[in-house]
Image: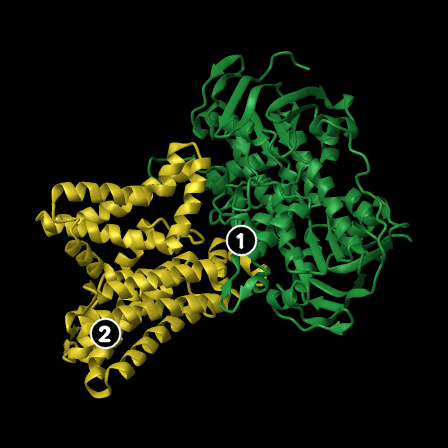
Amino acid sequence: MINEPLLEMKGISKRFPGVQALEDVDLTIYPGEVHALLGENGAGKSTLMKILGGAYQADSGEIYLDGKKIIIHRPSDGIKAGLNVVYQELVLAPHLSVAENILLGQYPQRNPLLVDWKNTHKLARGILRQLGVELDTRRTVRNLSVAQQQIVEIARALQRKSKILVLDEPSAVLGKRDIELLYQIVQRLKEQGIAVIYISHRLEEIFLIADRVTVLKDGKVVGTKPAKELDENALVRMMIGRELTNVYPKRNGDIGKEAIRVEGLTREGRYEEISFSVREGEILGIAGLVGSGRTDIAMTIAGAEKRDRGEIYIFGNQAYFRTPSDALRYGIGLLPEDRNLQGLFLKRPLLENVSIASLSQFQRSLVLNLREERNKVKSLVNDIGIRATSINQIVENLSGGNKQKVVLARWLGANSKILIFDEPTRGVDVGAKVEIYRLINQLAVDGAAIIFISSEMPEIIGMSDNILVMWRGKMAGFYSKGEATSEKILQSALLGANNHDK
Amino acid sequence: MINNRITLSKIAEFRKSTDFRVILGKFGILFGYIILVVIASILSPRFLTPTNMLNVIRQISIFGILSIGQTFVILTGGIDLSVGSILAFVVVLTGGLLPDYGILPTILVALLAGTGLGIVNGLGVTKGNVPPFVMTLGMLGIARGLAFIYTGGMPIPVLNKNFLFIGNGHVFSIPLPGIIFVSLVVIAALVLRYTPFGRRVYAIGSNAEAARLSGIRVDLNKIVVYATCGLMSGVAGIVYASQLAVAPPIAGEGYELDSIAAVVVGGADLFGGEGGMFGTFLGATIIGSLSNILNLTGVNPFIQKLAKGALIIAAVTIKARGRKQ
């Protein structure tokens, strides 16, 4: 490796009211390396990157780029110096074209008044080619897929002559195939001598693309090591400070009667002829690529999307429902894919977030019995183990895992017997993941019927009694716990039912 | 009682937070009001007299009642630009019906008319998918137009002595409009805090999609909210016609902005999900007190308009500063 560091962050400390977010953190990045930054939620990764990007100011510490000390007061300083952060939430202008977004604010001009559009598109195409991507530069960004939007964002960073690119959980929103493309792009950037700081919760991908790994815990650096010298267990140990055993504990619950049965469920253009059943105490996993219809099925069962054909039976009785409030009465609860956008009332306190689906329980004639409500919510919060300063805490400030538990508490409070988890561990750190697995298992043991949607192979195999694999809106495979392997599931998910040998 | 409770929980939070700006953000309204009162009582000894305070309450009661309805709408993330026009329609309807039908039937019809127009707003916003700004902007024109058509453009005199008591009478030497306003604030605050409907209003304003997925009937609740706002416009219209003893079709022009100002100064988030009746009450009182002290000290009325504008911006700036932390 080249010996001259490209970027050095030395002794970075940052304090927020009540928390030491970062304490004396050192980070050294070499040109052309992919440097993974790992740590549980709240370990300080995002804060460190925000300081690098100029969104926050460090309380102390220094930053050197190419051996020269630089001071970053605001994002534009960082960009000028060649630092670019691609945040988790993409910041594109949705109504503008691909080319306009890539060259935003720096359009080529032939005279001081007019933009040279021909040249704009030419430049944009050149940059995309550098990334090895074919994309029509005239398309409106709003109409692109998430993966394509991410590419546009990376292209924009490249256009600004970035030396260092920070990718904050870029794979969290992508399907399997798009992740492959992302890896290729990272590889290309690397070949051009651009350093990539890569933040991710997916440990397996760290070994695929990272050269070195820095692990943060509680605002301090646990260590920086070459990826080659580590394995998954070693990484987890560094991240949580202990060994993780029994990630998918065995369940010893009784399987009860059929809770939900779906027959020939069809929504034109989304999914067709879906049939399955889940009994009490059972977990049905639904695997498949993003966009294979998994989420649409979940939304339909939760009453949030319509169906064109097919029947749903709840405890043996045919259920007719058109809205989530109907589904709620049948005891169905959905933990949606995007907690922040679909699940939570971020500005409201924990209490209100939990009790919103069960207010009728606390209603005495016209008004709510607030004491009863508080007691119920408190006991739910304790049972599930939500860590919050009080039930009055604003939900926005909770960690990803705790947020997930808030939505779960809501449905448990509403006595839901059929729970649909859509990607419950996405963006959740390793420790919290295991906790969520335990909770789901406990719910099953207590007699809930669970539908578990996930893109992560190990967890879907580890958790589910049966696994349904979706491929382009169709059922491409159905495996029981014993027979399911990553290969079989992947083959069904990628190729469909007809094309795999069985 | 309700205000007391809210203040107590705020004090509890206050102890926990150490950062001054956070405190400023949370208590900005209250601080602002106290500072205003102190300055005002130095500038004019008459300001803090009971007579004057009651005067302020009477002056703010009409747009204050409007701002109660406006608070519900803004809490859901919407806005109602039609409250002033609906008020005008109710005012002329009251003036027109009163001579022939007597007080109670007139009031009933007037309230129903206000509520009905509110329901139309609600249906447009939910079933018609028209953005609240556009829907109620349209209603601003329609209701005002109805008021002009009904009167032929001429004001209708209101002569019924008993009816005039509503806007001008006193109970225990407190002006009746003030009593109506404060009672409605208390009822609305209780509804927001103690009923499932109140919770749903906050939930919808905080995240409509999450509310839907949690089993809340979002459309239905929004329609109820716009209907409530229409009802409040109806109440305000009755008070208006009674207080002024005349029913002009130009009644309440610009009141929509005053009502929105009260809600915003009161600390509500225009995007919904945050705010409350106590805040709105303070907001309306601050705006009213400011006009009052400027009147008492004989400040040029043109400057009064300027001061009100500056107040709105200042209130929101202070809140935004607190939020930043």
Where is B173 relative to A125, above or below? below
Q: Residue furthest front?
A: B172
Q: Position of residue A431 (x, y in %)?
A: 70, 36
Three-letter amino acid code at the position of disc 2: Val
Q: List the single residue furthest toward the bottom.
A: B100
Image-based side of A250 in relation to A371, left or right: right
Q: Residue A184: x and y, percent?
A: 68, 34
Q: Residue at x 32, y 64 (%)?
A: B183
Q: Chain of mark 2?
A: B
> In the image, are marks 1 and 2 on the same chain?
no
Q: Is residue B189 left or right of residue B52?
A: right
What label sits on residue B91 in the rendered view?
A: 2
Q: Colour of chain A?
A: green
Name the residue nearer the viewer: A95 or B114: B114
Q: Residue at x 54, y 59 (%)?
A: B211
Where residue A438 sits: x, y (%)?
A: 75, 45
Depth check: give the residue in front, A179 or B30.
Answer: B30
Callout 1: SS: helix
Q: Residues within 10 Å of mark 2 (few under 14, many from 20)?
A: many
Residue A120 seen in the current view: yes
Amino acid carrying mark 1 in the image: Glu
Q: Is residue B188 above or below residue A253?
A: below
Q: Colour of chain B?
A: yellow
Q: CA distance from mark 1 to mark 2?
A: 39 Å
Residue carrying label 1: A352
Q: Is residue A139 visible?
A: no
